[in-house]
Amino acid sequence: MSKTFGGFHSEWNLGSPGGWDYQRMAQIIGKHAWTRIRGKTDIDIELDFDDVLLNPVPSFARLLLRAHERNKGRACRPFIVLLAEEETLDKVGENIHFVEYLNGLEGVRAALAAPQELELRGERVCLRGEETTAIFADFNNRVILELGETHEIAAFLAAIRQGLVVNPRGMEPVGVKGVFEAITGEFRELMTESTYRRTPWTRLFYERATDGPAGEPIDDLIGWTRANWQNVILKPVHGYSGHGIIIGIKEADVDKAIARALDSGDYIVQEFIPPELWTERFPWVDLEKGTAYIKEWQTDFRCFVTDQGPIGFVTRFGGIPTNVGSGGGVQSTAVFTGDMPVSEAVERINDAIMGIGYDELAGIQNEMNELSKKIGNVYLLGPIMNTLRPRLITRGHIGQIMEYARNLWKDAVRLEELWLAGKLDRYIRMSPEEEALARSAPWQGSIALIASDGLFNFGGAIGDQG
């Protein structure tokens, strides 16, 4: 069954989106668990863990090689550099694995380094004496500027200006959360229908009059937020990894939470997407307590989008928020090709797994944990969680997501045009230094990677399961 998927994107990342390699590893672990589950049950549901969109790594590598070719031509040997903060170079498995993957490609050289390791030799940007041909930087603009206060990063800034860095720094302003107000308000008519429809109502959070989710007039946004506290979420405009998010349903002291956001002066208020839309039930093993039970997890769905269309997905789960940096996990996803509704397939799989019994499920869970360690499925907080049951999606859903992603790319380019023309200044607040950095490398739809984090429902949410 492939009815239209429901839900909204909660935020975009146009600066340096990650997660590509975590999905690859989640698929390995999830496929192993499914093979073991199938061997212990008579369930006859067929699942595909190997769809190309469930492993974004090869397509991401091809994107960087296209950038190299644009920069230096086919005759030049690629030397692709992935930049990350110095203290993370030996800790973030995703970056380490991706450089290893690139070095395994014929004729390609790659390295992982900190920005201050780059050097200028004339106009050439080099690393350890070798000229770089394309760079991916795991930083947002504010962090780059902060890094420049303590380190020499002239070569990095030159690489940005020369267009060596993917993504161009001019993309990032379009990804700040305040832009969602422009999409749901002033510039609604310029957006494609799918982008507008999947953008939650959003307003910059300060004392003001505006209009509400249904177009109703709001004389006092602060008072309206207090009165609708259970239905809103407050987010830092420039936040990442879920840090600083204030969730109405989880904050007992409303006035204190509102004051915290107002004191920051850099928050949005956004309609809270009902959890039953993006929460699914999964069999869960608690090895410490020696129990197996059905647990409800919030889910999200990151779409990776390029100038050539979508290249992959990342499916995360956890609390609110689901970010791995806030303790969430990355779960396997499988394409379901059967005729029954996704909700029915989910219930059948859950029942089959729970019928196995704790002892054998604990054995499968331990195998998953050991495999996770073996392949380096870790983040700064440690090993990354996975689930016994994969998240299910249909081929019909994939087709719908591809159209959504192409529209999102087109609209993001249009939004950058508006920003360059000075028409988004009220939605994008940044220091003069941040703006200068962004304007030094405009995007204009060139080779790049966008991530859209969606609170999407593909038919397996608790609202569908009853």
Image (cartoon, rainbow, N blue to C red):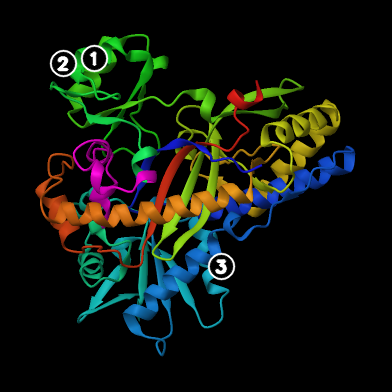
* Marks 2 and 1 in Cβ contact (< 8 Å): yes
- 295 w.r.t. 376: above or below: above
Q: Which residue type carries mark 3? A: Tyr
| Label 2 sits on residue | 220
Q: Mark 3 points at which residue?
A: 101
Percent coordinates x, y for residue 329 in the rendering: 56, 38
Instruction: Tell me if label 1 and label 3 are in contact, CB under 8 Å.
Output: no
Which amino acid, by three-letter code, is at mark 2?
Asp
Label whose residue precedes the other's in the sequence (1 or 3) = 3
Name the element at disc 2.
loop
- Left/right placement of residue 36 relative to residue 116 reads right
Camera-nearest residue between 131 and 68: 68
Residue depicted at 13% across the width and 21% down the height: 207
Compared across the picture, whether 400 is left or right of 367 comes to left
Q: 311 and 156: which one is in front?
A: 311
Instruction: Indicate which label's residue lies in the foreground, 2 or 3.
Output: 2
Q: Residue at x 21, y 17 (%)?
A: 259
Q: Which amino acid does label 1 sit on?
A: Trp
The foreground one among 99 and 256 is 256
Q: Distance between the residues labelled 2 and 1?
A: 6 Å
Image check: 367 left or right of 300? Answer: right
- Numbered disc total: 3
Residue tagged 1: 224
Q: Earlier in the sequence, mark 2 or mark 3?
A: 3
Does the magenta run of residues contain 188? yes
Residue 28 position within the rendered picture, expressed as x and y whole percent measured from the top left: 68, 52
